[in-house]
Amino acid sequence: MGAVSGQVLRVTVTGGAGFIGTHTVRLLLEHGHQVLVVDDLRHACGQAVPEGVPLVAEDMASPAAREAMIDFHPDAIIHFAAQGGVSRSLRDPAADALNNVVGTVAVMRAAVDAGCSRMVFASSGGAIYGRARRLPSRETDRAKPLSPYGAAKLAGEGYLGMFERTFGLSYVALRYGNVYGPYQDGTGEAGMVAITCQRLVAGEPPQITGDGGQTRDFVYVGDVASANLLALTAAYRGPVNIGTGTPTSIRQVAAALAQLDGSTTPPLFVAGRPGEVRSNFLDPSRAARQLGWSAKVSLQEGLELTLNSFQHRG
Ligand SMILES: NC(=O)c1ccc[n+]([C@@H]2O[C@H](COP(=O)([O-])OP(=O)(O)OC[C@H]3O[C@@H](n4cnc5c(N)ncnc54)[C@H](O)[C@@H]3O)[C@@H](O)[C@H]2O)c1
């Protein structure tokens, strides 16, 4: 059973210095919860962990992180820490599994030893379903990941089921769509909105892979933070899609951002990624039923907030 809504919770957030973690930690604090962040800062988003929040800057699988989690006695853990790149996972699947599978299992073990009763796991609706036979993807569809990154998320969900059956750790695996918003890394290979904002701010045109007709489920990070919060206290156990239910093409997103920026330079088209899924979007109805969650921020509003934050970065 989840904790009672309205109660002050002690929440450990792994990866709490990253993009989604930063937004979620702030929301947890706004709701009066007590937070411990475990993040070795290998891919921190550049925003300082809020004052008063203890930061354990260690690998999540290390004895020091484990001890800190146990000492904190959390009611719940939100587990974000991961190697986030699909392409990187394809280049080095073993390194990906070491962090994303072995590290995740170490966090679950520490959660049980800390007496924690609830775990919210950052899974991926974009990577877990693979080449879907019907869209939008539902949680009852068979997960057939195409990358080591997606396979690690599925493995994480498998371990969570086992930890629940054997050790009584209840869990929700939130299968996010393509999350975007302020503080996302725009310099890497993933995060199309952040990369486009970064390019526009540098005076470069948006870059589109393939013909740009690929569709994704873009969900604003503030909405994702709300889903994380609701999942802490919901009674539901199992996987839940966190998306808008609406497919949007890469081309549409690039055009909307260019228009907001006032850029008239045509986009740069580069070769598509072989094997890339053409269309992916999620059915969010279980999230509405079980968490009382739905996306509130429209794509236009979310893109505006995101571009604005990139334009005003120091
Ligand atoms: N961004 C998306 O669109 C998206 C979509 C689906 C799922 N997710 C998942 O959500 C989670 C958060 O994603 P994000 O976009 O905020 O990523 P991010 O890279 O910004 O944040 C991850 C954080 O984890 C930390 N970290 C990584 N490995 C660690 C380790 N071994 N020990 C301690 N800290 C470690 C990094 O320093 C970073 O601060 C990840 O699990 C990711 O797979 C993200």
Image (cartoon, rainbow, N blue to C red):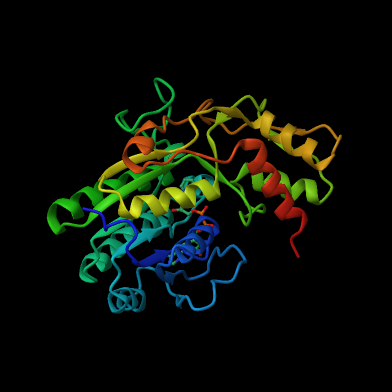
Rendering coords of residue 174 (x, y %): 38, 45
Q: Left or right? Give the position of 2 relative to 31.
A: left
Q: Depth check: 196 or 146 in front? A: 196
Q: Depth check: 80 or 311 in front? A: 311
27 shown above or below 158: below
Q: Depth check: 155 or 120 in front? A: 120
10 shown above or below 87: below
252 shown above or below 92: above
Rendering coords of residue 230 (x, y %): 38, 50
16 shown above or below 279: below
Q: Depth check: 285 or 68 in front? A: 285
Residue 279 can be seen, yes or no: yes
Q: Given the current orientation, which residue lies at the most extreme front position? A: 6
Residue 271 can be seen, yes or no: no
Q: Left or right? Give the position of 169 relative to 139.
A: left
Which quadrant holds residue 270? Answer: top right
Rendering coords of residue 253 (x, y %): 67, 34
Q: Given the current orientation, which residue lies at the most extreme left position? A: 166
Q: Given the current orientation, which residue lies at the most extreme top position? A: 134
Rendering coords of residue 289 (x, y %): 33, 35
Which quadrant holds residue 300? Answer: top right
Which quadrant holds residue 206? Answer: top right
Q: Left or right? Give the position of 167 relative to 264.
A: left
Residue visible at 38% across and 58% down?
Answer: 79
Residue visible at 37% across and 59% down?
Answer: 78
| Number of marks present in the image shown | 0
